[in-house]
């Protein structure tokens, strides 16, 4: 049992009943505020905690690690410390902010230096993303796409049940929640009898995903076996893999999605640790065909995270268009990482690996407009009477997620992004 | 006219007749030697020139830039300086090592600190590769692959003549020349009637490519027009895109190559600047269909670089298996960069963009074993009487390249990599 996960712990920092960030969460991120340019932090309730300030005041002296990682503008150096240190730091934070602990609680001077109201700071990219990989691990999503674009009778391709299919993505354009994105321009071929045309994307979409962030891996040539995978996974974020369906359709054969994806992906700012998610792990769904031994084992566990997608048209209320769950993934994050490295591919601290669109079994749990509107044939009705087949300029897409059990809610906050007109 | 390219300049450093590195080249790389861990350098003939030592001695005082970029273990910070500074530094080096210049030539003490024999140093990765993209820009290669795996009558896919097709690759596993690579293991399906199997790759291949390395681009959302592309391209290297054909075949539909590529790619250590290649530029081949305006313009120029592939079996001489040329690319590097950013995708200093396999029109100019042995149906004969359909353990693959005109040879050196048995 990870002590920090004890549902009975209460913090001396005030935490609202439905907060995503009780003391059992302790996620990690990077914040800025005035002269503080970019620095590691955690959050309890609505209070952001400056980890460098804590270290400077000696509150981490009992934990053996290089405190300079908290001077860095990203978490990459922190991620190199490895699981046992990540865990020791989280346990120390759990202890320090426990109601029973007076060390900081009674030191008003120190609290002034350490604590910030969440609405007075800005959250930045938590990591400089090294390599980014996107998987395709929801069977429902792969089946829906196969049904729409290929053959409903053979919707899943022959490799899908054997391989956690994935592809390399673009790291440079991953942005933090709140960053608006311009509608991309590009080449499409709306009429297969005519030459391609150039212009703004007409079929702009979101994809409801989650992504995990890795620590430092092994040298090139060595693999990370399934049973060791969790040691290299730091935590997870919400991930919106914005997609330009018309650009993607024309470009993606035979080498995969490229400009249909690389104009931007958005992540939530707080990385929720795998440790904090431990109480919400589940066994995988039953395999439909036997899988090879390197992908099979007890280390495979799903995570039960409730997910929600909202669209907020300009100057209107947000409207929920989908509710899904991370548990719908057929392939686990352990299988993804074991597969990714089985050929000797090395991973670095700060790699990002996303799940692929997480669609559930029912139409209102699909994770993209492509599926929700079934290729535009079933438009969604919005509260203002308008319809959505795909995203409009001015729409803000909001993804939210949380796990809940025994009265403890471990939340991810949200990732938002507004669609601006094409430049 | 770039002054440093003047064919009449001679250096006071000795340069052998067929050297890849006359004073007209001045490529950039990272070297180490004993206590010098990793530091920027250039090379003339067989003499490696320590750029930090030059800066410390004041030899760059006439050029306005932050000299600290030469303290860095990679060229990434140098690459952020931009084209006019890259050019000024190269011009200064051309001037300093010109036979007519006595500043350093007559200073034995300074020369001791600056100059190293090439066989006494080690070359390292020149950049920490940020994002890596692989294109697919040789029409002959795309046609050969389409003929073998799809339909000889429609070998080129419908999008190929309209789009410089590319895909995101794995940056973490790009290694410098001389780094051996283990044969990857993975999942393949040799018999389509049977379940997939796991084991070492059986169809290991090289791909003859070149890659360009970028400077710092524009903010996310903005594009780099064709006419500006050359301002953001620092230089080129030789690139061996090792490929596991059997792994690739089973995994790549629908999202593209993944583990069949990500176990390793090898680059030559010296980045030859685009400026040094200016005399070898050519107009593009005729477009076979009209292309969209964002890909069309005078900025499109090919580069005439002679390329050679050798295979050196264990304890034997190297044997040339292919001669090709960068000029066979249908899509230019300017088109690649303009296309890559047309959707607003941002590029960073240190991004790598490779050409895709460069195959010529004749069978002895193909850039991969897949094509040279035509899927294994026409094995190559080696001098020792053995045959090669694909690569064997112990084989070293050597790529070489040079441009030549007016008695000046601008070479890339070589990229070598040895195949070690699977772990």
Image (cartoon, coloured by chain):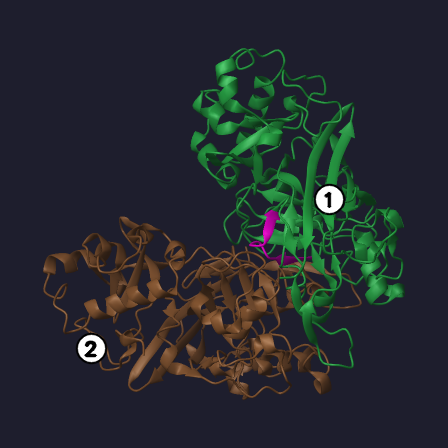
Chain colours: A brown, B green
Chain on which label 2 sits: A
The label number, if any, that marks residue B398 in the structure image:
1
* Residue A358: image location, x then y, percent: 52, 78
| Circle 2 residue | A10
Q: CA distance from mark 2 to mark 1?
A: 63 Å
Marks 1 and 2: in contact by CB < 8 Å?
Answer: no
Image check: B216 left or right of B339?
left
Residue at position x 57%, y 33% in the image: B121
- The image shows residue A245 at horizontal and vertical percentages of 62, 69
A267 to the left or right of B181: left
- Prevalent SS, magenta region: strand
Indicate the position of residue B48 as horizontal and vertical percent values. Answer: 58, 28
Could you tell me which quadrant the N terminus of chain B lies in?
A: top right
| Viewer-nearest residue: B237 or B416 | B416
Give the image location of residue A256, x and y in percent. Answer: 67, 65
Residue A9 placement: quadrant:
bottom left
Asked whether the viewer can see residue B251, the reply is no
Which residues are the magenta region?
Answer: B166-175
B170 falls in the magenta region: yes
């Amino acid at each position: 049992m990870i002590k920090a996960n004890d549902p009975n712990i209460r913090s001396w920092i005030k935490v609202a009943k439905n907060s995503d960030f009780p003391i059992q969460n302790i996620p990690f991120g990077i914040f800025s505020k005035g002269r503080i340019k970019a620095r590691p932090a955690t959050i309890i309730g609505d209070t952001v905690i400056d980890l460098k300030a804590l270290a400077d005041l000696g509150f981490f002296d009992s934990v053996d690690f290089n405190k300079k990682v908290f001077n860095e503008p990203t978490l990459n150096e922190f991620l190199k410390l490895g699981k046992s240190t990540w865990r020791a730091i989280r346990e120390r934070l759990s202890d320090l902010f426990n109601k029973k602990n007076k060390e900081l609680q009674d030191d008003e001077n120190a609290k002034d230096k350490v604590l910030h109201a969440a609405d007075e700071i800005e959250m930045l990219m938590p990591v400089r993303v090294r390599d980014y990989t996107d998987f395709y691990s929801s069977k429902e999503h792969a089946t829906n796409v196969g049904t729409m674009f290929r053959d409903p009778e053979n919707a899943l391709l022959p490799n899908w049940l054997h391989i956690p299919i994935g592809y390399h993505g673009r790291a440079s354009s991953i942005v933090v929640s709140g960053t608006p994105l311009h509608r991309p321009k590009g080449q499409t071929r709306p009429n297969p009898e005519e030459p391609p045309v150039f212009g703004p994307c007409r079929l702009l979409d979101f994809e409801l995903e989650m992504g995990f962030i890795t620590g430092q891996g092994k040298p090139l040539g060595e693999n990370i076996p399934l049973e060791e995978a969790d040691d290299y996974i730091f935590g997870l974020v919400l991930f919106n893999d914005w997609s330009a369906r018309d650009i993607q359709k024309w470009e993606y054969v035979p080498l995969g999605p490229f400009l249909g994806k690389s104009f931007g992906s958005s992540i939530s700012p707080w990385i929720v640790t795998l440790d904090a998610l431990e109480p919400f792990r589940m066994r995988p769904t039953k395999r439909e065909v036997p899988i090879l031994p390197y992908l099979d084992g007890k280390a495979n566990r799903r995570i039960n995270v409730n997910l929600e997608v909202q669209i907020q048209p300009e100057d209107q209320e947000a409207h929920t268009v989908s509710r899904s769950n991370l548990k719908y993934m057929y392939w686990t994050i352990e299988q993804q990482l074991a597969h990714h490295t089985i050929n000797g591919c090395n991973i670095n601290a700060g790699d990002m690996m996303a799940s692929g669109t997480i669609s559930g079994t029912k139409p209102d749990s699909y994770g993209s407009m492509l599926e929700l509107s079934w290729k535009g044939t079933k438009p969604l009705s919005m509260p203002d009477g308008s319809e959505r087949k795909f995203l409009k300029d001015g729409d803000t897409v909001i993804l939210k997620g949380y796990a809940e059990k025994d009265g403890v809610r471990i939340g991810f906050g949200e990732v938002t992004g507004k669609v601006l007109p094409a430049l």
